[in-house]
Amino acid sequence: MMEKKEQWSSRLGFILSSAGAAIGLGAIWKFPYVTGQSGGGAFLLLFILFTILIGLPMLISEFIIGRGSGNEAVSAYKKLAPQSVWTLIGRLGVIGCFLLLSFYSVVGGWVLTYTIMALGGKVINSSADYGALFGQVISSPLITIGGLAAFLLINVNVIASGVQNGIEKASKYMMPLLFIFFIILVIRSLTLEGAMEGVRFFLQPDFSKITGDAVLYALGQSFFSLAVGFSCMVTYSSYLNKRVSIPVSAGSVAIMNVFVSLLAGLAIFPVVFAFGFEPTEGPGLLFTVLPAVFSHLPFGELFLCMFLLLFLFATLTSSFSLLEIIVAAFVKNSGINRKKIAWAAGIIVFIAGIPAALSSSTLADVQLFGKTVFDATDYLVSNILLPLGNLFIALFISWRMNEKLVKTEFMLGRELSSGTYAAWRLLMQWVVPLTIIIVFLHSLGVIG
């Protein structure tokens, strides 16, 4: 027996859940660092421009496909383009989300482990060598696999509860808390002596540092940061009622994502520079530099706990969307109970994630194309599958999907001008696909 069609209870719930899916670890700790190293405010302006011209149109497209079909990712393309090669887009999305979740949950496990350690007072007080502490965590098979299991257990319980009682309810708590924690941390950071040096590092435009790589990274980040490409937002928007304006909702999600990226930089760099630390890329900033910084602050353990909880919320809300696209596809096409599918999917993702979890320990010497299992999976997903997913979706909505249905979905819920629709369609037909091709070829090293 097929389960009753689920829906978001409100436009706010949909926006918060979609924003949560978009706002992940990359937007919070990788993006600020790259911004600072690639021209500061100049790079930020490029990112905002490309988000408007590239990321936002793609987000609107996925919303239209989802609500226009009323189906999750796999069934959506089957309904809109039956018995055609386009139906493979949904399957690509499910496969991509599965692979992404298998290693993303490993990082989520690290964050969860550090959060628990910090709440127990075992991070700042444990050792002055925070790099060694991080090394101990990721090189322990027991800790990494345990963290992977615990992180996925949270995801399974939320997804098994459904759209309204699971994803929406969790996002309605987590997203406001994320913003509250961020604002508190930004205020604390900006009140430190020497904080303005960090603000200048993050925001002051330096056009001499804008290279071709920086421009292409800003292009790629504009759609990567909005969780588009694997049809996660197709699944989310399939639960959306017809009274909600898709362009307005997509704009709200994009604005929230840019705002969080700004808050991240303003929370991190002032405090890092105030204590004379150098900003570090990737996990080092979160797991080694920030604990060292907070150890110098009054109530440092409290602020570190807040920061780690913030990262945990961002990681979880993103992973919800990855597991939901997998679960929704099987629930729709098999008719099996959502809870059973969620638990089965969680177990399979856990098993698939074990090699990535052991990439810094027992499987450190196992190489795929010169990379660890973790890095190879990351490269496959981020540099190949995700750009291809974005390209196929852009081509599908521009050249295959019924234009009358596309325009109807675009215009519903808010009175918009025909010129707004025409501008969006022009971007999707030509600008977005060409841009994605450029980013894809650059990621493969074909163009410099």
Image (cartoon, rainbow, N blue to C red):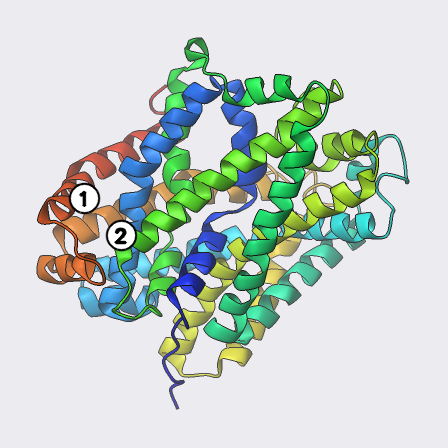
Q: Kindly state the secondary structure of the residue where label 1 is placed.
A: helix
Inspect this view and state whether residue 145 appears. Answer: yes
User: Looking at the image, how many numbered discs can be counted on the residues?
Assistant: 2
State which mark lies toward you, 2 or 1.
Answer: 2
- Give the quadrant of residue 185: top right
- Which residue does the image show at 27% across and 57% down from the upper left? 246
What residue type is disc 1 on? Trp
Q: Quadrant of the N terminus?
A: bottom left
Residue 162, placed above or below residue 37 = below
Along the line of sight, the residue nearer the viewer: 181 or 46: 181
Residue furthest bottom in the image? 1
Inspect this view and state whether residue 368 appears. Answer: no
Q: Position of residue 104 (x, y in %)?
A: 57, 50
Within 10 Å of disc 2 (Cα), the crowding (few <14, some 14-19, many 20+) is many
> Is the C-beta separation of discs 2 and 1 under 8 Å?
yes
Q: Position of residue 316 (x, y in %)?
A: 58, 56
Residue 63, placed above or below residue 118 = below
Q: Kindly state the secondary structure of the residue where label 2 is placed.
A: helix
* Residue position marked by numbered label 1 in the rendering: 424
* Residue position marked by numbered label 2 in the rendering: 247
Q: Does residue 412 appear left or right of residue 440 in this picture?
A: left
- N-term-proximal mark, 2 vs 1: 2
Q: Position of residue 127 (x, y in %)?
A: 90, 35
Q: Quadrant of the C terminus?
A: top left
- Which residue does the image show at 41% across and 58% down from the upper left? 15
- Which residue does the image show at 87% across and 46% down from the upper left? 122
Rounded to the nearest angstrom, the CA distance separating label 2 from label 1 is 10 Å
Q: Does residue 309 appear left or right of residue 79 in this picture?
A: right
- Which residue does the image show at 80% across and 54% down from the upper left? 142
What residue type is disc 2 on? Pro
